[in-house]
Image (spheres, rainbow, N blue to C red):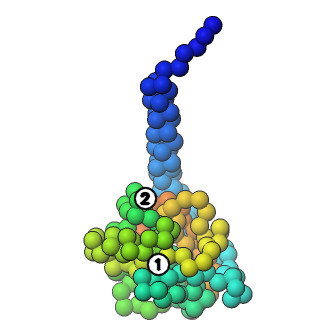
Amino acid sequence: MKIRLNKRAMLTYVLIIMTGFCFAACNNNNKNEKAEQPVLNAIAEEATTSLPEQTSNDVLFKDKDGKTVSLKSLKGKVVFINFWATWCPPCIHEMPSINKLKQSFKGKNDIVFLMVDVDNKIEKSTAFMQKNKYDLPVYVPAGDIPPDYLGGSIPTTIILDKSGNMIARIEGGRDYTSPEIVKALNELVESN
């Protein structure tokens, strides 16, 4: 028996399978929203990971002017790091809430927001922020990002306490204006 493959049918089948995978990946964010409450409790209650102590292991980011900032230099401040890209729909979807969150901390010097474009396209990501009138500072990695900070998906948000301890690692899009997140960050900012 000879089997003939119809190229058009095969292409349609492959496209349907790929669309299903994409839908499943995007739909994974709904699961993350349901799991948000335990994550928020973790933010408020405990530190899980410390920053490396050696300078060679420091995590570095670069802004549009080429100025480098290290996480070690930010000790004493709460650090909100969001890894994102301009082509990522969940990243774009959560951006207004991150902007509102940053505005709610305006005038407080004990918290820093770093929006890290994982594509290293600082001009494109800066233009995106300006076009949407977001007051969010854009950076690109200036070295390796530890895998416990950024695994295999974006958006990923890391929150560090004033000692540089990782308080939370949140994968997937979120509403960062939720009262629980604002409260948890306020507690971190007001802590010694």
Q: Which residue type carries mark 2?
A: Cys
User: Which disc is residue 125 wearing?
Assistant: none
Q: Is residue 11 above or below residue 155?
A: above
Q: Which residue type carries mark 1?
A: Tyr
Q: Earlier in the sequence, mark 1 or mark 2?
A: 2
Can you see residue 162?
Answer: no
Marks 1,2: beta carbons within 8 A: no
| Secondary structure at numbered mark 1 | strand
Quarter of the figure with residue 173? bottom left
127 left or right of 168 in image: left
Along the line of sight, the residue nearer the viewer: 117 or 73: 117
Question: What crowding class fits label 2: few (fewer than 14 Cα within 10 Å), some (14-19), or many (20 or more)?
Answer: few
Q: In which quadrant will I find the N terminus?
A: top right
User: Which disc is residue 139 wearing?
Assistant: 1
User: Which disc is residue 88 wearing?
Assistant: 2
Question: What crowding class fits label 1: few (fewer than 14 Cα within 10 Å), some (14-19), or many (20 or more)?
Answer: many
Can you see residue 38?
Answer: yes
